[in-house]
Amino acid sequence: MHEALEKHLDTMRSVGRPRPVAPVPSRLRHTREGMTRPRSAPEFSAFFSRLASRSAACLEDERDHGHVFLFLPVFMGTGAILWFAADDPPKLFVLILLFCGLACLGVVSRYRNPCWHYVLLASMLMTAGSLFAVWETARLDTVMLDSPVTTHITGIIEQREEGASGEWRYIVRIAQTREPQLRRPPSRVSLVARADHRPFMIGAAIEGRARLSPPSGPALPGLNDFAFSAYFDGIGAIGFFLGAPDVGDSTLSDQPQTDFLTSAQRALASNLLSVRGAIGERIRTAIGGDEGAFAAAIVTGERRALSEPVLDDLRRSGLAHVIAISGLHMALAAGLFFVGLRVVLSQFTGFAPSRPIKKYAAAGALVAAFFYLMISGAQVSAQRAFVMMAIMLMAVLLDRPAISMRNVALAATIILAISPSEVMGPSFQMSFAATVALVAGYSAWRFRRSRDGYFDFLPDMPFAGAIIRVVGGLILTSVIGGLSTAIFSLEHFHRLAGYSLPANLLAMPIITFVVMPAGLVSMLLMPIGLDRLPLDVMGHGLGLVIAIAHTVAEWGGDVGSARLARWVLPLAVTGMLILALLRSRIRHIGTAILAGGLITGLALPKDRTADLLIYEDGRLVGLIGNGVDNADVIATTSARPPGFIFTQWQNGLQRHSHQKPAFEEDALLAEAIAPRDITTPDGGRRFPVLSENAIRYASAKLAHMLDMSVDGQFSCLNKVWCVARISGGWRVVTLEEPRLSGLACDLGDIVISARRLGYDHCRSGARLITPDTLRKTGSLEIWLGPHSNGAIALRSAFSGRARPWSLHRRYDWRSGRYDMKLVETVLTDLSGSGGSGRPAYPEP
């Protein structure tokens, strides 16, 4: 080797080339003593100059490949999120002026400063996203019920859906109310009828006495706000019928509408929903059981008929996405129709060679996808999937690539322009996260460096190679889809299916090759009554999917997570978008951001869990267990807390044990404070004042229960009060009897009344929390400091000014006015000087 090297050097010298010298790393220089010294300031300047030039070259490459357009929905969605999440968003005219100013500056800076041009363009798109959010909010203007009420309603059924236990849920458009007549009746309500009755058809008039309640806010600060989604769904109240509903006045459905277009739209929607209901009923009847309910959920989107155990198995196994009409179902339905129609057309040898049958098949698939959208109820996820599928099929008609990131960006832009509120929900976030990740992964795989020889050991086994490619594709798709949606699952549902990969590998081939083709064939044959055989095949396939979900759910592996820190999701999403939407080396900035967000979210210590939880109605109060033995416990004031609320508490805090209260009976006290109401001359009602003996006995009883109560557990006396003592000396009293509020204020430190009082402060200095307080703040979390100085900190579900979906909380039906007192003022009164003069405990 040395001889060859010397010969090579001699050859180079003979032709006049200089002798090569081993390069010295630029970041180190050798001194005379053989030591190294750091890089000098000019060298640093040169390094950053090279870095800036290379970054500029990468950005130029991204622009040349059209990747700037991919960030159009990103900045629009960011603007919508900022407007929806703001405590005090800017007014409409401010946004319009800002948009116009940014647009003018963007035009001026286009050829002068490209960097500032893109900054101004991004700001303009964010402003546009906020404007679309304002427009959608003002366009809907949903009237929300302000307080729970029992009234007699009459209305027209717009939608209906059967539940797993035989109950029916109706979406009713309210025509009138009486006994009492509501001053601000909601336009549409969601009512459940549990009593036996003959199901009402869509468009029929219905009436009955019903209990109505406003849509609930977050069960804890930071959790899902159901009033937000109800507002943008047009639902102003939820509730249930008291008994079986009756047939309403039939003339209500025949009343002419002032707007012909509105009347035509409602008639068309009624007919479509009737067809949808008939299809769902046919599928459930033909297949039966959970398999029939599963099949109906896939075809028509009606999911309430699925039993709770099956739903739980699907969630725990990671197969819950199968029951939601999404891109998977739309792609399978349109794809199967596209392939089938193309195969049929190709059989006509005289027609196929001279006609673009691929475009004909794409047009037919577009019609089939639209029909699927209609019979599925046009849910938000289905609308989003249809827009994406329509863009891809239109690309086929225009001879453009069907699967591309530009098509995904265009679909997201259209959806954000029409319904920007969807960007706040998990359905939009998870759907587009999975789609973007899959398209980016597909593109990276397609443009990878080819490396031959991987399957040389299978020269005579092409079938085995095809199987390996199919299985590998399923594995890769499941891995990419699962990883891209994991952070959203933890953020919104606080759980992650650990064995979702094997569950999807086992179930998705059945869904793809058995269930969806059988469902498509059954829909084509249903009008002529030959759908029984394909429905049976569909039912058997879904039976296998249910068995897989049950088996995988029994393995465990369900990973739970408490509420993530506020910065984790934004950082993770930013990193994922940069990594997926860019192609040059600067995309790895997204990798660093994503890793940094996840590492900091997992490594940094969690905030201390609150000591006291209060739901927004004041009737459910929880204590967080302290110490080693009861660290996973939530003690409540109810032996059977509402499952809908308590499950959110358990998942959000990752505390799954429940400590029931200790009940005590006292017939003497119950008799002394029995609510014998008196009718006043003006028709009102009042309760008599308690006698001195009753007050004295109640005071002694309350003091004794406070002294004897166990730390971290509630002790309750019938439906009069519940008391608890928390480590550190804090005494908590929850009250059902308003006439004992004075005693509770004298003996407790924190008093929570489930009924309205005539005042909002305790003269003794105790913190008083009433329904009026909770209407403004929503659910509360309270951290207790040292009892010696009475320091506490609070976190509320709502803060800042009232937004359109929470404005009903400020309405007083007695006066007909809105109380616009800021939530911060209420919280300051509770934690600081609200009648007590005690200092506030610092925010955790």
Image (cartoon, rainbow, N blue to C red):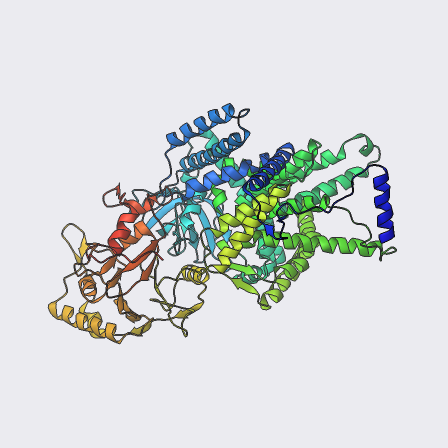
Q: Horizontal placement of 252 versus 282: left or right?
A: left
Q: Residue at x 53, y 55 (%)?
A: 598
Q: Residue at x 51, y 24 (%)?
A: 107
Q: Is residue 562 above or below residue 518?
A: below
Q: Horizontal placement of 183 versus 59: left or right?
A: left
Q: Is residue 610 in view from this perspective?
A: yes
Which quadrant would residue 141 be assigned to in this image? top left
The mark total stands at 0
Q: Quadrant of the C terminus?
A: bottom left
Q: Horizontal placement of 111 versus 229: left or right?
A: right
| Image x and y of residue 498, in percent | 58, 62
- Closer to us: 387 or 547: 387
Q: Is residue 374 in view from this perspective?
A: no
| Image x and y of residue 525, in percent | 68, 46
Q: Is residue 168 above or below residue 346?
A: below
| Image x and y of residue 66, in percent | 63, 33
- Closer to us: 549 or 60: 60
- Closer to us: 529 or 490: 490
| Image x and y of residue 174, in percent | 39, 43
Q: Is residue 567 above or below residue 403?
A: below
Which quadrant would residue 187 be assigned to in this image? top left
Q: Is residue 542 above or below residue 812?
A: below
Residue sitting at the far front: 32
Residue sitting at the far bottom: 708
